[in-house]
Amino acid sequence: MILRYFVSAGIIFFLAFSTLSAESASAFQGPGCMGECADCHKLTSEEASKLLKVEKFGAEIKEIKMSPVKGLWEVVFSKEGRTGSAYLDFGKKYLVEGKFTALENLEKEIEKSEEARALKKVDLKKIPLDGAIVLGDKSAAKKVIIFDDPDCPYCQKLHEDVKKIIAKRKDIAFYIKLFPLPMHPDAYEKSKTIICEKSVKLLNEAFEGKALPKATCKAEEVDDNIKLAGELGLHGTPAIILPDGTLIPGYMPEEALIKLIDGEPQQGANKGEKKQETGVGKKTGKKTDKKADKKAK
């Protein structure tokens, strides 16, 4: 799914893979509407484009149709040859992200998702580290790569854990590749500023929510990182790549992350512990570890 690739921070989102509240559910109902929903509710491509601001991200709307769930339109997006769907309520106030899964298929879908995630590995040779921001000793035996967004709340949370880890483990170093998501409109310029200076101090200040100066160079590495993330199949932040190339798509608590870095099996590591913001991603099942911009700061 590529929804978040197109969504700006100005849109009011509602991520609903848990039970919808009564207040939210009421927004999906059209008062006084009888018969077919399409008879009462209309949404044109032009209106959807304006509401979702897709043109800002170089995307276009390919199709609008009624979703499998009443009260929602399915809006099909396209960008750079990739397509994905989003769901907009009839009240035109909420955007619902994800995939509808029939409850009878829920267990199988969750198992498939967990298996795919557990087996995911990245080719480390494809990731240049020359321009990465290094936290820890460059000569450390264990190198961990993190694709971060400076405005991602879970990246900020992980960053605090990373500082704790390098303080007590001199054999672990973290290489930060900045990967700003379109859902954070200021993250791109912040990433450029940090990369231009190769500054851990600026990275810290970004995660502290402080204003950063303008970039002093073109910082083409930011665009290179975005392209690389797509080639590696990274759909959100944080994305942690262990020394053996294993991909952890999302936040991991300090102690659990240390065990994974040390090669220790972590029971339940793939069951609800990871949290991630996504610009390009897919979701399966009743729960998802790729959550939106909730108040995690």
Image (tube, rainbow, N blue to C red):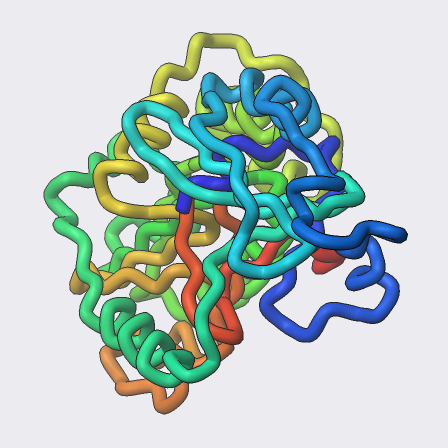
In the displayed structure, 248 sits above or below 94; it is: below
* Residue 78 falls in image quadrant: top left
User: Is residue 5 among the parts visible in the rendering?
Assistant: yes
**Residue at the spot 28% in from the left edge and 61% down from the top edge:** 247
Residue 242 picture quarter: bottom left
Residue in the image at 59% along x and 60% along y: 69
Give residue 103's position: percent from left, percent from top.
Answer: 47, 80
Seen from the viewer's position, the closer of residues 271 and 42 is 42
Please indicate whether residue 85 sits to the left or right of residue 232 in the image: right
User: Which part of the image, by quadrant, shows the C terminus?
Assistant: bottom right
Q: Is residue 251 visible?
A: no
Residue 50 x/y as whole percent: 67, 21
Is 168 situated above or below 41?
below
Residue at the far bottom in the pictured view: 267
User: Where 9 sits versus 285, above or below?
Assistant: above
Q: Nearer the viewer, residue 245 or 45?
A: 45
The percent coordinates of residue 11 (x first, y second) are 72, 35
Seen at 43% across and 27% down, the residue is 62
Name the residue furthest front: 35
Observer-nearest of 6 and 230? 6
Residue lying at 51% horizontally and 75% vertically, measured from the top left:
286
